[in-house]
């Protein structure tokens, strides 16, 4: 199973890239754990997770070909 991960803002800075393909993850929680292993600084920040352009809250099942975006907090005015 292959998942495309998109990074934005501060998260892209931490990853040193704006995307990553990752395999063998079944849930959004498992993906977050794997990404924290690769990029330990992710443990220190708050971000939202979107699967196929929809924000998810917790342990969401992932399917082959899904696109997951890690979104930093939004601000503006």
Image: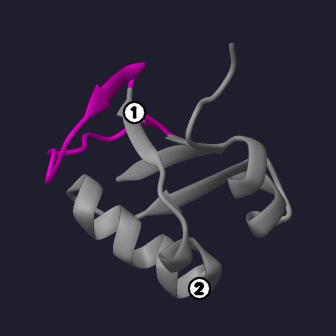
Q: Residue at x 39, y 33 (%)?
A: 50
Q: Residue at x 59, y 85 (%)?
A: 40
**Nearer the observer, 70 or 64:** 70
Element type where label 2 sits in the image: helix
* Overall secondary structure of the magenta section: loop
Marks 1/2 in contact by CB < 8 Å: the verdict is: no
- Counting from the top left corner in percent of width and height, residue 25 is at 31, 64
| Residue 59 highlighted magenta (yes or no) | yes
Residue under pointer 1: 50
Choose top left, top right, bottom left or bottom right for residue 77.
top right
Q: Which mark is residue 74?
A: none
| Residue 13 highlighted magenta (yes or no) | no
Q: Is residue 9 above or below residue 43?
A: above
Could you tell whether 73 is left or right of 17 in the image? left
State which region is magenta. Answer: 52-69
Q: Which mark is residue 40?
A: 2
Distance from Cα at disc 1 to Cα at disc 2: 20 Å
**Nearer the observer, 44 or 6:** 44
Element type where label 1 sits in the image: strand
Q: Is residue 41 above or below residue 77?
A: below
**Nearer the observer, 77 or 61:** 77
- Tell me if I can see residue 65 in this picture: no
- Counting from the top left corner in percent of width and height, residue 28 is at 27, 54
Please tell me which of labels 1 and 2 falls first in the chain: 2
Q: Residue at x 55, y 40 (%)?
A: 73
Q: Residues within 10 Å of mark 2 (few under 14, many from 20)?
A: few
Q: Residue at x 59, y 44 (%)?
A: 72
- For the rendered model, the colour scheme is one colour
Q: Count of labels shown?
A: 2
């Amino acid at each position: 199973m292959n998942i495309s991960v998109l990074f934005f803002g501060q998260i892209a800075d931490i990853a040193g890239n704006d995307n990553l393909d990752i395999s063998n993850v079944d849930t959004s929680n498992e993906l977050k754990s794997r990404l924290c292993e690769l990029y330990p600084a992710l443990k220190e920040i708050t971000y939202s997770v979107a699967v196929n352009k929809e924000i998810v809250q917790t342990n969401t099942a992932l399917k082959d070909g899904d696109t997951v975006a890690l979104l930093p907090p939004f601000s503006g005015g």
